[in-house]
Amino acid sequence: MAIKRGLGSGLDSLITDDYLTGGKLPGKYIQQESKISINDIEPNRGQPRTFFDEESLEELADSIKQYGIIEPLVVQKKGKRYEIIAGERRFRAARKAGLKEVPVVIREFADEDVFIIALLENIQRKDLNPIEEAQAYQRLIEGHNLKQEDVAKKLSKKRTTITNSMRLLKLSKDVKEMLIMGTITEGHGRALLGITDEAEQLALAKRIVEENLSVRETERIVNETKEKKEKTEDREKKKPQNKERAYREAEDKMKEALGTKVEIKKRNEKEGKIEISYYSIDELERIIEMIEKTKG
């Protein structure tokens, strides 16, 4: 008789009571643990995890060769085959180890439950890289018409955790790739969000690797970069204001000297014209006389 094994208290504890549709896990038992042909099993197409470290899989395969699969895969019937709900990494390692059969627990799940269970398992085992996790949250929200608060409640997480994770999707493509490969950490990624220019963002990401910068050092550099940029922007904003002020001051000086209205009209940054107003022939002659006196 097959021995019934649980999925571990970790996965159970991640699913809150209000999310459960019955029992410890969503869905219902169709069949308790049994062994089925590995050729009758297929991966979950909606699996949130897309990157599998080959070296880690080889290590798990070696362990499986020695001790077998300790924890059964969770699957559901899909036509004549079985779809993996939890345990794709074990499935891949079992194939590497040359197993013909693997232990499974067969259950039936709602579509939303399928994705959430796969996500929960990966989160518990820390198998997802930061970008995969953020994309999984996004898929839950967009695919099931949920809010961040709903996802947080289903996964027993704080809403800010979901928010901060999804913000990583705003990083440039190259920086996200560095997160996926583990070249930089999630903390580095959050710090880099402070830089909006993609070229500058990537340059600092490469510097993190080259100089082995900590998250705190990265945050300091980002803050210094932002402050420097803000000062530069302030100076650029003030330049036109300062020039306009200089023109107005020049107009006031000529107005005071000539005793009439004077306007400076710019064509461009280097050229323009000065308009001197007069309101009678006598005033015109007075202005001409004043200008001629300045020659001497």
Image: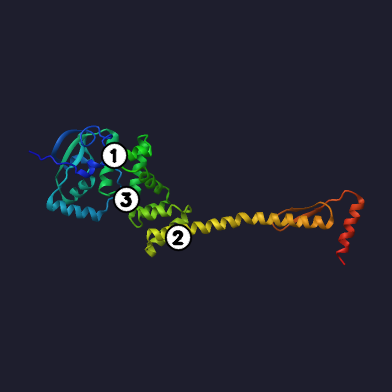
Instruction: Using a 10 Å C-alpha cutoff, classify the residue at mark 3 as few (fewer than 14 neighbours), some (14 to 19) or many (20 or more).
Output: many
Q: Which residue is mark 1?
A: 116
Picture mark count: 3
Mark 3 vs 2: CB contact within 8 A: no
Foreground tag (2 vs 1): 2
Q: Which quarter shows the N terminus?
A: top left
Q: Amino acid at mark 1?
A: Ile
Q: Which residue is mark 2?
A: 221
Compared across the picture, whether 277 is left or right of 164 comes to right
Q: Amino acid at mark 2?
A: Ile
Q: Which quarter shows the C terminus?
A: bottom right
Which residue is at a point 20% across and 43% down the rendered structure image? Answer: 9
Q: Earlier in the sequence, mark 3 or mark 2?
A: 3
Q: Which residue is mark 3?
A: 129
Name above or below for residue 95 compared with residue 75: below
Which residue is at a point 18% across and 33% down the rendered structure image? Answer: 29
Residue 137 location in percent, x, y? Answer: 35, 42
